[in-house]
Image (tube, grey):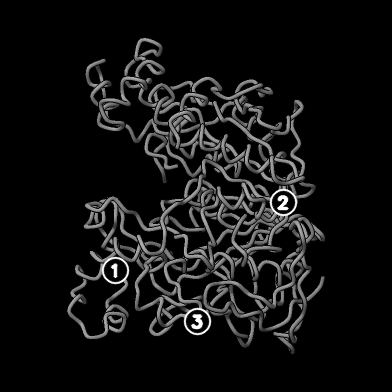
Amino acid sequence: MRSFSLLVVVGLAGCGGVAVPDGGVDVDEPRVDGGATLDGGADAGRCGDGVMPAEGVVLTTGGAISGQLTSDVTSFLGLPYAKPPVGSLRWRPPEPIGCQAGVQQALAAGPICPQQLADGGVVGDENCLTVNVFAKRGVTGAPVMVWIHGGGNVQGSGSDPLYDGRDLAARHGAVVVTMNYRLGALGFFAHAGLSAESDAGVSGNYGLLDQQLALRWVRDNARSFGGDPARVLLFGESAGGQNTMLHLVAPGSKGLFSAAIAQSGGVYSTTLSDAVTSLQPVVQTTGCAAAANQVECLRAVSATSLAAIESAAGPLAKVGLRYGPVIDGVVVPDHPLTLIRQGKQHGVPVILGTNADETSRMVPAVRTDAEYRAAVTTQYGAALANRVLVQYPSARFSSPRVALIALTTDATWTCPTRRLARALESTQPAPVYRYFFTWRSTGPAGAVVGSTHGLEIPFVFRTFGALTGTAPDAAALALSDAMQASWVSFASTGVPSSPVAWPRVPSGGDAALEFGTPIAAMPGVRTADCDFIDSLVP
């Protein structure tokens, strides 16, 4: 169970599937201009012939599977969508899973991908590329909601209880899919030798390619679970929201989803060449620096040892780099914001949202104005800090700590999200919406963490039971009802429902919907502060 104060918060598909070539750009995939209408998938030969139809058994591209019925929702857990990325397949684009004989029991989540925990321990298994599907019994043509978990691309899994899709499926009839994807060094390691062995000449975006293959699996199998492959919402939070933004511009993701929601997301700016240089500590730490063939040596290193090289606390921290997707010119052709400003995104309806106090569990514990000023100076440098302190004086807020939370939240999430929303609105006809999540607990934890990073997740999934020390009141449950309805409506129609009119982002504007108590339309989100923050951006 999670502590609240620590929240980081019937068509039969064929057997086979389409392989993802190096670089993830599949020129043979069906494409549709604008991305609003999706290919419905096509059977590529029956997989599971001879299996007798039965309650809870469906045929997929990987064979016949049997799920578990709870109330009126069937859960299919731990479904492999790719061959195990081990041995010679480590650091290669994922390959679709082949047909499995008989009926596979999909009753338990698969292993999580290797990752280092906060205490330094490593958990997980390299054979981890699975999805979980939650579907209400008897649904047909339902919208599909595909979730990308957060965790900085180094932690997390699709089987976290916080992402349990049963409530969304039961209450709203959506087909909900969560996924695992390769993390850390196994998912986002770039190396000149790996680029040389790739037909596309790139490396580093393996976790992103996993997500693309999972989306192809959803397209090819949605009907088997009662879903509509032409109505697929891609959504995620934190790193999952950032990855969602990349799929908006990644050529290999075009046509695989019809709408997108990025919760507390953003964009990446690390180039492949920078990543190759900066990730050399991984090679050195494993002892492969002197090897005649570094790639061969690295493929022999255990997954546990690689996952232990966690960038936040290990050697990568010294060079200021974290594992994550890279701009390689192929999988991600250019900086996402540049591509969006050029109108090269897939043109689907988008919701972008942030929370009011994203950094409340991330900032140092400043107590005095002097400590606040020192923290701002450390972040911005002496000359720029003076300008920042004029806009964000501690006297404007209830405490120096609250001032630092507001500043860092705006600089990292609120204002960059506005820039993304404006860029999307200016270059696509499909609507763009924003939300601002302001709910906070009335108890002691609420005073400390406020509307912290990830707090909106249990409202979307209605998984308050995954958090210890929480008992949502009637107002919180009503807010959860409204957010679930909005997300499912957006998945179904590309327009979010709301108790009040949810304004589209206007040209050069700042409108949003506040998810708080009450829910209300906002003419702007910290507009003056974001005007100032934007003035600091080159």
Q: Amino acid at mark 1?
A: Leu
Q: Secondary structure at mark 3?
A: loop
Per the image, the residue denoted by label 3 is: 199
Q: Earlier in the sequence, mark 2 or mark 1?
A: 1
Residue 533 image point, x, y percent: 46, 28
Q: Callout 1: few (<14), some (14-19), or many (20+) C-alpha neighbours within 10 Å?
A: many
Relative side of 495 to 521, left or right: right
Relative side of 86 to 36, left or right: left
Q: Earlier in the sequence, mark 3 or mark 1?
A: 3
Judged from this view, the residue extending furthest toward the top is 395
Q: How far apart are the two marked residues, 2 and 1, measured between alpha carbons?
A: 37 Å
* Mark 2 or 1: the one toward you: 2
Residue 522 versus residue 164 in the image, above or below: above
Residue 494 image point, x, y percent: 76, 46
Q: Earlier in the sequence, mark 3 or mark 2?
A: 3
Q: Secondary structure at mark 2?
A: loop
